[in-house]
Amino acid sequence: MARRSFGTSRLGAVLFALVALAWLAPQAAIAQTGEAIGRGIVRFEPRGFDERAWGPSLALVREFDAIGDVPAGWDATPDFGRRDDGRFTARLAIEPGTSLYGTGEIAGPLIRNGRISECWNTDAYGYNEDSKSLYQSHPWVLGVRADGSAFGVLADTTWRCEINLADGVLFASEGPRFPVIVIDRASPQDVMEGLAELIGTIDLPPLWAIGYHQCRYSYNPDSRVREIADGFRSRSLPCDVIWMDIDYMDEYRIFTFDPEQFPDPAGLNAYLHDNGFSSIWMIDPAPKREPGYFVYDEGTAGEHWVQRADGSVYEGEVWPGWCTFPDYTRPETREWWAGLYKDFIALGVDGVWNDMNEPAVFNVASKTMPEDNLHRGGGDLPPGPHARYHNVYGILMARATREGILDARPEKRPFVLTRANYIGGQRYAATWTGDNAAEWDDLEASIPMILNLGLSGQPFSGPDIGGFIGNGDAEQFARWMGIGSMLPFSRGHTGKGNRNKEPWEYGPEVEEASRLALERRYRLLPYFYTLFEEASRNGMPVARPLFFADPVDPALRSEDDAFLLGEDILVAGSVTPEADREVCLPRGIWRSVDLVGGSDNRHLPDVMIRGGAIVPLGPVVQHTRDPDALNGKLTLLVCFDEEGVADGTLYEDAGEGFGYREGEFARTTFTARRIGDSVRIEQQRTGGTMDAPSRPVGVRVILDGVVFDAGGFDREGVIEFDLEGVGAAR
């Protein structure tokens, strides 16, 4: 079946807007109250909101007390009402020239003005731009005004909720009245930090999780897993993780292993570890309804299952056949679920993949369980229908999974990947963009999808590189490797029945392009790790839209074929089969850099460094278990601004464990100045109690068309050299 393009015709856009406008007018305006709960953060409640019945927010990291009234002169005040279709609404008017972003996981362009989406976690196999809802729900919009100031609007509701951006910002929920939180600050970055104050941040992931991951549905039997691992190592293709999809299980029963195909999971994990790989294994939410199967028996004895409206146990069809579903709203159920991981993790499992947790149900039109199913709640969560808890089923599962892994292995950082999630779910799991297709449209869409997820509080996400559905072709795969290797979560993945999509399966030219792409990522690992640590502190995205470099420049507002990594690296790739489109660059100096050689490879995106930046680079390693990943040569990539000044930061720790929480890390700030042909770089420890690794240091200075390499420096003191003395590398 032909897939619709992610582009939209002018006539289609007009019709789209007319239909959207027809839904906008709220009926029966409802008064509201407001109170400040933070700097530039105001919480509004509609008259008649019942806070006791509502229960605690599942989006917010904690309850926030009022610190004052709505600030004088505050303009970003929502209007509450009720629409003709019965949905309760909250609407915020916007100024002319305001650009809208966020809305979480959604296909289509970066800029969201004029778009309608819906928060309703959906098994969205083969989605495209017309898909109204995908796997995750983020009832959040970021707005950037013409003057570069910004605001964010969070509708704090878990119910099915439309986000209509045809004329301002409109949330329309099927549930009861809900509060709205508005952040109004000086810049989009400042708003993102405010969002992090509200919903929390990611925990710092283990270093290995930032490497490259290889997956498919499925690598089986276990000899095939070893073959894939050997294929990467024999070809010197960097890779850190091999994934196990559902075919490792015994007839799809979770927490079991096929006795013929995976007779020794501990031995397989040991083999992977010995060869520098970590392993991630899938666990779905729905155990098979089968007396004698230990998960079903325990869940039944503990009354852990979601119930029908009449109080009987709900059963639905998924991979194993008829299944029951844990009621994660119950503290007792989350504790039981967490305990299931003890023996599983003891086999050497490094991370867990929670899939199908929208929750997906087969052979029903809704693709999920009935909305009148009963969740019994407990603790702070009140009982309620599935319509209330559907969008948070995945986040509650991911939370329990993370707690189980941490309880089973408290000395290491947990890693969880979840398909379904809710705003704030970055506290528990990374995400990916679900079942995309090996189509050029999906390659192009992967960049704005990751950017808008980042702008919705989830910095750790990425697409299935190469496309999950279908085969694609060599050119498309090579381009996707080039882009995907630079996104926060970097994983190749494809489905059953498709061609093999390991990087060497497309011939020598694509294998070489893939090798260069992966070597680029591993060269940038010190910088990536520094960005992830920043995200864990203040919620800033790892991959950022170009307008972050200059929020006032209107030309950057809709640029979504390129992205920033942090503030200092810009990635601009060709994501369509046609001739390259010229990317609109932010003002200032941006110089192309050759990280590993092969910068002229036609498959790979251009990588640029900002004038005024120092970016830390590591050596090319095959995996992060290599001691050189933390202790090998450090290279400072320097690009001076117009004044001959540059600076940058490097964060280092053990790459694993929780010592960094007690100060066992090293944060170093580098400041460089060029005076004529003389370069002086000062190193200053600005955080942490850990001794910085005594790794050798080199310096690479990027000038206009010329690269200068100097080496042999120490981690302490001042670095000084003359450009004339070291000579040009090219």
Image (cartoon, grey):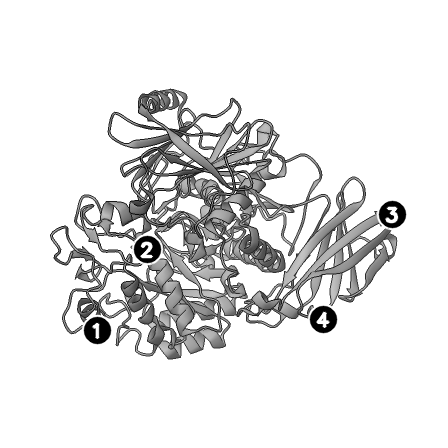
Task: Measure how far apart labels 2 and 4 are at the Cα level.
Answer: 50 Å
Q: In this view, does 478 lie above or below 281?
A: above
The residue under label 3 is which amino acid type?
Ile
**Marks 1, 2: nearer the viewer:** 2
Q: Whole-Å distance between the Cαs marked 4 and 3?
A: 28 Å
Viewer-side label of 1, 3: 1
Q: Quadrant of the N terminus?
A: top left
Which residue shows up at 27% across the image and 64% down it? 333
Q: What element carries label 4?
A: loop
Number of residues whose C-alpha sits closer than 10 Å to that of mark 3, classed few (under 14), some (14–19) or many (20 or more):
few
Q: Which of marks 1 and 3 is nearer the N terminus?
A: 1
Residue 254 screen position, x and y as percent: 27, 67
What is the number of the mark on residue 694?
Answer: 4
Would you say the residues marked 1 and 4 are in contact, meaning their CB atoms lie under 8 Å apart?
A: no
Residue 297 or 117: which is nearer the viewer? 297
Say which of 707 and 652 sits in front: 652
Q: Name the residue under label 3.
A: 675
Kindly identify which residue carries mark 2.
Answer: 380
The residue shown at (69%, 70%) is 691
For label 3, the SS is: strand
Work out how far the residue at label 1 is from the one at label 2, CA to CA, in angstroms: 29 Å
- Relative horizontal placement of residue 672, taking residue 156 as reference (left or right): right
Q: Which mark is residue 294?
A: 1
Q: Which callout, 2 or 4, points to the residue nearer the camera?
A: 2
The answer to whether 617 appears left or right of 348 in the picture is right
How would you rate the neighbour count of disc 1 (Cα within 10 Å): few for under 14, some for 14-19, many for 20 or more? Answer: some
**Residue 224, position in %: x, y?**
36, 69
Q: Say few, some or many: other residues with alpha carbon within 10 Å of mark 4 (under 14 / 14 to 19 / 20 or more).
A: few
Which tag, 2 or 4, sits closer to the chain's start?
2
